[in-house]
Image: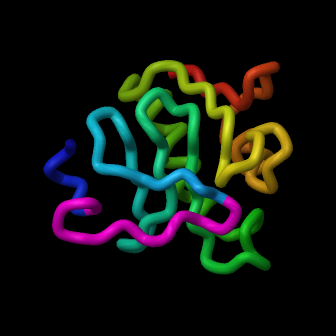
Amino acid sequence: ADPANAYGAALSWPDPPEGSTHKPGRKAGSLVVLVDGELTLYLERGGKTLLVWPLGHDQAPTDPRVQLAVEALTDAARAGALGTITTERINGTAALTSPFSATLESAGFHPTPRGLRLRG
């Protein structure tokens, strides 16, 4: 539980993104990415599940906040702060068929049989 992550302690978690039944939690190894103070990404420990909160359903794949958050995640991986991540599910959907897969791939994730992989 990262003391710098106020979610789950001082701030309540938002409802899961549309289509997801997975709920975020304040757990060791999980990551949150904020853009302009708003929760945008939650990556569970190990990276198998990614939750994305876009501004609106219609803007989901093209939301610039999501692009910034994914780029921050890939920058952290390139800086050595993360190991290899293989994301299998995004908002309850298989990562390879998610509307967000193109955003992750353009930021440096690569498709694999198990999902989208980012090497640290």
Image coords of residue 15 (percent x, y):
49, 70
Q: Which residue is the extreme one toward the front?
A: 21
Residue, x 57% and y 21% (percent of image)?
A: 119
Image coords of residue 28 (percent x, y):
27, 35
Question: Is residue 52 shown left or right of residue 9?
Answer: right
Residue, x 74% and y 22% (percent of image)?
A: 114
Image quarter of the N terminus? top left
User: To which quarter of the image does residue 99 belong?
Assistant: bottom right
Residue, x 72% and y 69% (percent of image)?
A: 60
Q: Which residue is the extreme one toward the left?
A: 3
Nearest to the observer: residue 85 or residue 28: 28
Question: Is residue 58 shown left or right of residue 120?
Answer: right
Question: Is residue 40 shown left or right of residue 20?
Answer: left
Number of marks present in the image shown: 0
Report if residue 10 lies within the magenta region.
Answer: yes
Q: Is residue 12 above or below residue 103?
A: below
Q: How is the image coloured?
A: rainbow
Q: Which residue is the extreme one toward the right?
A: 97
Question: Is residue 32 shown left or right of residue 20?
Answer: left
Residue, x 37% and y 40% (percent of image)?
A: 30
**Magenta span:** 7-19
Q: Is residue 76 above or below residue 51?
A: above
Q: Is residue 9 above or below residue 104?
A: below
Image coords of residue 70 (percent x, y):
57, 49
Query: Is most of the magenta stretch helix, strand or loop?
Result: loop
Image coords of residue 13 (percent x, y):
37, 66
User: To which quarter of the image does residue 110 belong?
Assistant: top right
